[in-house]
Structure formats: C-alpha cells, structure tokens
Amino acid sequence: MTTPPAIAAECGATSYDCALFYVGRHEFAAAIRYLDQQLAAAPRDLKALNLLGIALTGAGKRDAANERFRAALAIDPAFYPALKNLAINEYDAGRHAAARGHFEQVLTLAPTDEIANLYLAEIHYGAKRRAPALVHYEKSGRRFAQDPRWTLHYGRSLLDAGRTKQAVSVLDQIPEADGASLFEAGVAFGQAGAHAEAARFFGAARKSYKDAYAAGFNEALMRIEAGDNEGAIRVAQELIAEGVRPADAKMTPPAELYNLVSRAYEGAGRIQEAYDALRQATRLEPKAPENYVDLAMICVEHGNFDLGLEIVDIGLRQLPNSWVLYLQRGVLLAMKGLMSEAEKAFETARRLAPEQNVPYAALGMAWIQTGQTEKAVEVLRGELPRRKDHVVPYIFAVALLRSGVEPASPGGAEGVAALRASIEANPRFAPARAELGRLLLKRDRVDLAIPELEKAAELDPDSTPALYALSQAYRRKGDVARAQELLARVSKLNAQERGDDPDGELRRAVVRIVREGTAPPRKPPGEQ
C-alpha cells in the first residue's frame, strides 16, 4: 500500500508514526492499516506488535489483540509493555487469576510500574485481600484518581487499616460533581466509625447525588453520631423546608426524618422540640411502633410518666398487639410505683412475644419489687437453658441474690455463673459487671472483683453503685488514696444511688434493657 503524501504529511514520517497518531485519535481502523504495513516489512518489530495489540483492543477485537501481545512476548519475554497490556485485557475479560500472574511478572521486570501496581491492587481488593491491595495502591502514584472506583477502593483499604487521615486525603480527590462517588465515600467513613467525615461527604453529595433525601438523611444521621446535634437539626430542617423525600415516600417529608431529628433535639437538650418531632412522626405514620416507643422512652428518661402513658395508649389503639408498646406501658407504670399494673402489662408483652427476652427482665423486676422473689427465681431459672442473651442471666442473678442466698453459698456461686454468662453474651452491659463485682467482693474475691468494677465504671461512669463498691475494694487492698478518689466521685453524684437504693438501681438497669431491646433498628448509612 502506498501512503498518500497528504496523509503522510499529516500523521508522521513512518507507518509506525502514523499508527501512533491514529491510535491517539481512537481511529483504530486507520492505525491497524499502518501497522499491518509496518509489520509486513518488519515482522519482529516489538513496538509495532504491541501497538497493533492496543489498536485491536480499541477496535473491540480483544482475542486478536492478545495474539499480537503474545507474539511480541514470544520474541522477547522481557518486553513488559506487551505483558502489561495482555494482563489488562485478561483483567477486563474477568480472568483475574491469569491477569494477576502477568502483572506480578511485570513487576519483576519493572517494580515501580504504576499501572501494574494499580491493577494488582484492584485484584486484591476484589478478593477482599485489603492489606496487599493497600501495598499496591500506595505504589500506583496518582493513577487511582483516574477512576472514582479506584479512588473509593483505595480509600476503603486505608480505612480498613485504621488510617482515616490518609483515607480523607485520598477520597478528597473525588470530583465535586460526582455525587454517587461522594455518597459511597460517606458510606465508607460511616461504616468505619468516622462519623464527622462521613457527614461531610454526604453533605457534599447532596448537590449532585441522584437521591438528595438519602444524602441529607445520612448527613443528619452521621452528625448525630458525631455529637453534632445542632448540625443535624439544621440539615433536617433544610430537608423539611425543601420538601425533599425519597422516591417511594408517600409523604413529604417522611416520618422517619422527624424521628431522626427528635434524636438530635434530645441530644441538644431541646426536649420539648424532641417531643413535638416524635408527635409529628406518630401523626404521619400512626402504624409505626418505633415512633411511640421512642417518645415513651424520652418520657421515661425525663420523668414525664403521665405523658408517656398517654402516648403509649394512643399507640395501642393503633397497634393493639404490639408487645413493645405493652412493655413500655409497664415501664411507665413501674416508674410511677404501680407495680401490680406494670406486672399485667409485662405479662401481656410476654404473651404476645414469648420468644423475646426483654419481657422477662421487666417481669423479674416486677416480681422482685412486689415480694415475689421466689417466683422470679423459679421462672427465670427455667428460662436460662433456652436463652443465650445477657438479659435473662442478669435478672435471674439479681432475683437469686435478692431471695436471701448467702454470697459464699452454692446459691452465690450460681449467681456468679449467671452473671458471667450475661457478661459473655454482652461484655458492654455495665449492670452485670457491677453486680458481679459486688458479689465477688462479698465472697472475699477482691482481686477478681476489682477488674469487673473498673470495667463497669468505665462503661457507665455515673454508676455510683459500681464506684462505691470499687472504693471498698481498694480500701481492702490498702490503697486508701484510690478509695478516697472514688468516694469523691461518688459524692458528686446522687447520694441516693450510692448502693442503698437497690430497687432504683434495678429499675434503671431494666429501663436500659428495655431501651436497648426495643429500639428499632437504625438504618446504617447508605440504606435509604
């Protein structure tokens, strides 16, 4: 083929130069014609074979391209540009094992090759091998910024390694207009527990993400988790004012947004506004029990028991078979001292949900406080083999100890075993650790009691029973200074909680069990 002079002048002095010119313009058919001409004259031209493979790949002829790459490697196995391009084609075809072998061979020939490192990082990431993926991402220069998926994967790998600051630097490379990638970055930070950074990325995503409500809801949620309640309130108010809603929502805005902002109001100490937000949520979704539950719990925590009962009764008219509402009703009655009525509500909750553990804690409290301790011990002991949670073993141990067993007796040992089972099921349940520490102290096992009481005080710094018992333990050990320090902390708290109000302590523990056991599942970031 004779090259027309005009074209030759335009594209270059040689057939290879013209092919390179047309590849750069993605005019692959023209490039292939020039490369065929070049290889007809010089069939062992490695650069021409490699460029022909690239042109054929661009033209959608991957198998033919791979033949050219392999032909170049047959001539010179160390010609790594062809090996790298072959590896990329194998990767794009989904043959990752073959691609990995080729890329690793490339790195034996060119250890600093950024593209080979990037693709190896992606292969390891896809196989959930985050540590080796991170090693290769860090050797890829700034190649990761060429594709938002690569940027996200690099950022997630850094987060998995606990390197949040570096992850921020990487994920900040996502363009402002790429709302989808910004949203996914927010999800990644949220899952890693970096809530403030998650909120920032969700906030940035609101400008261009396809679902502005999801981005805004998650921004508010992450601000709450980060302790920025006022910021969460501002975001929620913006969404409400703008009428933003999810695509499948029947109302603008949805009840879940009012429920969310109520958490922020409560966290900010704006209790009346928290009440109002949850009342609006119950009006918007009268069949959603979580709104009544959350409102009742605010009433419990702020001593507004009559309002709580009013709210729960409204909910029960809508949801007459809701065990969680009966449970909340019982808690409110118990807080008013109406233990017989509370017991009836707890029994109803147990009948409606016999598989649930929380009603047993509430019933155990009611039985103990109405003088039916032996009944509590008998019923709860029967439930122990069927329950693998922290609730039943804890309330059983409390009932057993309230029944008058001696700490050093076999009954005391049974209480220790039950409390250890509770802690094993939930190591962060402070009441069980406090109860175990005090029981061990009574059994003269001071060295065993102290770690449990220390952990209880760490998990619940306002637990005066744990602090008081811990001061006694250190006094027994002869550490008077530490004992006095703990007593000073106790003196700053309510003196009535020093350990001489066992019924109040039990009620507080049960309220916590109810709060944690009936709280509706919160949507993690990204699930809108």
Image (spheres, grey):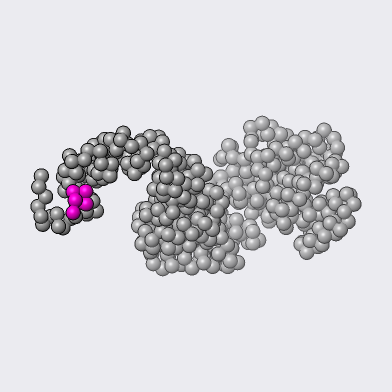
- Residue 368 quadrant: top right
Asked if the magenta segment contains residue 490, the reply would be no
- Residue 388 quadrant: top right
- Compared to residue 228, the image places residue 513 above or below, namely above
Q: How many numbered dots are placed on residues in this image? A: 0
Instruction: Answer left or right for 93 relative to 379.
Output: left
Q: What secondary structure is the magenta-colored segment mainly?
A: helix
Q: Is residue 69 visible?
A: yes
Q: Residue at x 65, y 51 (%)?
A: 512
**Image coords of residue 123 (percent x, y):** 42, 41
Q: Residue at x 50, y 47 (%)?
A: 135
Q: Nearer the viewer, residue 522 or 353?
A: 522
**Image coords of residue 258 (percent x, y):** 48, 61
Q: Which residues are magenta?
A: 13-18
Q: Is residue 287 visible?
A: no
Q: Residue at x 68, y 34 (%)?
A: 384
